[in-house]
Image (cartoon, helix red, strand yellow):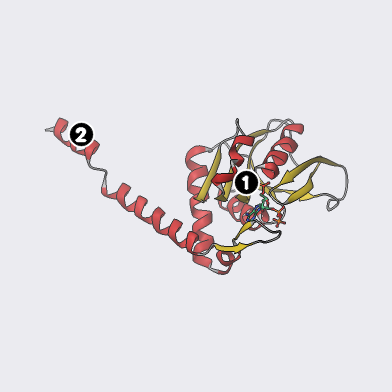
Amino acid sequence: MRKRVLLVGLFFPSQSKIFTTRVMAEKLDLISKCIRTFYDFPTKGIVFKDICPILKDPKALAAVTDLFEEHVRRRYPQVDLIVGIDARGFLFGPLLAQRLGVGFVPVRKKGKFPGPTLSVAYSLEYGTAEAEMQEDAVSAGEKVLIIDDLLATGGTLYAACELIKQQKAEVLGCLVVIELKSLNGSEKLPSTPVFSLIQY
Ligand SMILES: O=P(O)(O)OC[C@H]1O[C@H](OP(=O)(O)OP(=O)(O)O)[C@H](O)[C@@H]1O
Ligand SMILES: Nc1ncnc2[nH]cnc12
């Protein structure tokens, strides 16, 4: 009898699993409906994904935080810090860090931080820039997750990973709301898992 119950459990997922999957799908649907596309912004040929409507919809913004939180609690319970990237990573990072009860550290574009900084130059889908972090922001050995709104060519996340490594901390992975798969950004981060909510 017990054997039969176990077999049934193997072939038919439990009601709670079905419910969780449905809730997750509803959240992803809500988020994806809030992403707008603009052509030729900021330069000709770029298909720009605009996340601003997510911020205007409290349910969609909570859905982003819920899904990231769920993933991090399951996969990275050891995380010490969330590192967010200027500027759109700042919109999601502190919310997630608060939920997890860990600190948030910003990576900014060059020239914004007082005091000693580390910097890494990089290129992104539509230009070049330099990423900076305060020298004392992350300690050696800390376990870090990096968050941003979007992964395109991967130049930005790569630069952020380099900054963390310069401080002898460990990058556990990266979290993004949107991944533009056709640009192969994750290939620039071969040893860093990237978790994305929505893929194009
Ligand atoms: O994968 P990549 O090709 O590097 O591109 C992704 C980056 O581009 C955008 O930032 P942007 O520099 O435009 O800054 P913003 O957030 O201040 O608009 C986006 O928010 C990512 O950080
Ligand atoms: N296509 C894109 N849409 C929005 N943000 C971006 N950052 C880099 N590429 C982008």
Residue 118 is left or right of residue 38, and the answer is right
State whether residue 4 is above or below residue 41: above
Q: Going by the image, does 17 lie left or right of 116?
A: left
Which quadrant of the picture is home to ligand 2?
bottom right
Nearer to us in this view, 122 or 107: 122
Residue 83 lies, with reference to residue 5, above or below; the image says below
User: Circle 1 sits in a helix, a strand or a loop, which is it?
Assistant: loop
Compared with 80, 22 (above or below) is: below
Of 127 and 115, nearer the camera is 127
Marks counted in the figure total 2
In the picture of the structure, the residue carrying the numbered disc 2 is: 6
Residue at (32% x, 47% y) in the render? 17
In percent of width and height, residue 193 lies at 56, 36
Seen at 63% across and 50% down, the residue is 148
| 166 horizontally vs 116: left or right | left
Q: Position of residue 188 (x, y in %)?
A: 64, 36
Quarter of the image where one finds residue 90: bottom right
Q: Residues within 10 Å of mark 2 (few under 14, many from 20)?
A: few
Mark 1 highlights which residue? Answer: 102
Question: How crowded is the residue under tag 1: few (<14 C-alpha within 10 Å), some, or many (20+)?
Answer: few
Residue shown at 87% from the left, 50% from the top = 114
Residue 143 in percent (x, y) is at: 64, 35
Q: CA distance from mark 2 to mark 1?
A: 39 Å
| Residue in the foreground of this view, choosing between 114 and 100 | 114
Give the amino acid type for the residue marked by disc 1 in the picture: Val
Q: Looking at the image, is mark 2 or mark 1 earlier in the sequence?
A: 2
In this view of the protein, which residue sits in the foreground, 136 or 44? Answer: 44
Element under disc 2: helix
- Tag 2: residue type? Leu
Quadrant placement of the N terminus: top left
Residue 41 at x, y percent in the picture:
67, 61
**Disc on res. 184:** none
